[in-house]
Structure formats: structure tokens, C-alpha cells
Image (cartoon, rainbow, N blue to C red):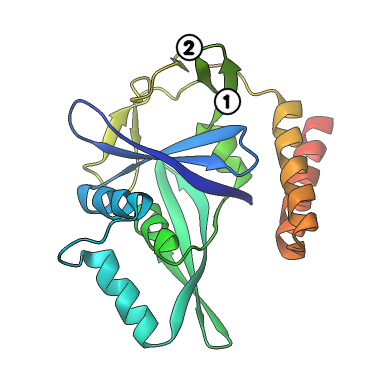
Amino acid sequence: MIEMRVEDLSRDHSRQGMVWLRSVEGRVMVPIEIGQTEYLSICAELAGETRQRPLAHDLLQAVLLYFDAAVEKVQIVDLQDHVFYAELVLSVGDTQVRFDARPSDSIALALKFDAPIYMDAKIIQQVGFKIHRTEQGYELRRLQPPAVGLVKTEAASDIVQATELPIQGVDSQGRDIDPDELLEVLKDEMNKAVEEERYEDAGMIRDEIERIEARDAK
């Protein structure tokens, strides 16, 4: 698992919302489409604003706090048929509870509880972008060529053309991933996890490194 943070929010011409997750070490980025309610919640959290009336995520936060529960972490664990899957990990006293959840809802709650967000490295390899710094700022290049057809995330109504992601500087032609680049990102994350004494996370990242190295050795 790679630790991610919310880097930015964006909307395209049709007002479709997008949340951009960036790896903590800062070298890869992944976009996920989100609905209007999730967009408003995440936007409010990033701006440090309190809405006049509570949204669904505000209500859920209040319920969790009332029952002495908190969001421990969010894990975006899978990508199947262009749909992202996440697990919302709660701590209730000494008990850890996991729930299947949409990434957008999970991200909104993670921000409310200042909880970390993790993403499986395989997902980053499939739909992530590598960040390249330029004189004008930075540009994003796909780690893999875009899939043919539509990219669908979260719900049937959340659809965007794979070659029309709304961000300036994306290399829409795409490039094959350099395995060494992904391994370098993973090793940086593993070292960071060890330094912060997150040994369970370091172990998971090490397993992913070994899986990739074993595959490339064939």
C-alpha cells in the first residue's frame, strides 16, 4: 500500500468532480471521479470551512464520535471493470472494524478524522500518472497507456473518457511504465514507513516489491 494525500479537486466542463490523490513522497498521482455531495464535503474540509447545515459526511462523523468511534485509515484496495473499491477502517475502543465503502465517501471521512489514505500499488500502476517537473511547473504522464473506452468510477453515472481527464499538461498519448520507476517509488515509501515505525505498512510494501521483482524476473 502507498500512502496518498488529497492534492486537489477539479471539475470538467460538465461539472463532473474529480479528486486527485498524490503519493506522500510526491512522485505519482491518481484521479478518482466523485459525486456532487462528496465534492462539497471534500472541498469544505480542504478549505477549513464549516457548512451552515450538515452534509451526510458531517452527520456520519457526529454519529461515530457519539459512539466513541473514529476513522483509523482508508485503504483503496481494488480496481475492477473501471470501478474503484475501498475499505473504511474504524477503531471502536480496542476493536478495529472494516467496511466496504466508496473511495469518495472514505476520503471525505478520512479528511474529517485526519486519517491516512492508502492505495494498492497495482491500482497506481494501472491508472496513475508520473509527475515530471518542468520550467512552467509540472506535467503528468500516464504510467500506462489509457484503456480504450470509458473509465467508470463509483457509480454508473460517473463516467469520463479516458483520454479526456480534466488536467492541464497530461500526456494523452501515454507511456508504458518503467518497472524501475515504480520500484523506486515503492522503496521510498517502504523506507518512510520504517522511519515512522509503521512496520505493518512497510511489510506490505516489501511484499509488493518482491511480487514485482519476481514477475519481472520471469
Instruction: Please report contact status of discs 1 and 2: CB closer than 8 Å, yes or no.
Output: no
Amino acid type, callout 1? Ile
Q: Which mark is residue 131?
A: 1
179 relative to 135 in the view: left or right: right
Whole-percent x, y for residue 95 in the image: 56, 85
Dot 1 or dot 2: first in sequence order is 1
Whole-percent x, y for residue 135 in the image: 56, 11
Amino acid type, callout 2? Gln
Whole-percent x, y for residue 165 in the image: 36, 25
Determine the CA span between mark 1 and mark 2. Answer: 15 Å
Whole-percent x, y for residue 1 in the image: 64, 52
In this rendering, which labeled residue sits more in front, label 1 or label 2? 1
Callout 2 environment at 10 Å: few (<14), some (14 to 19), or many (20+)?
few
Residue sitting at x 70%, y 23%: 178
**Residue picked out by circle 2:** 173
Which quadrant of the figure contains the C terminus? top right
Residue sitting at x 71%, y 37%: 185
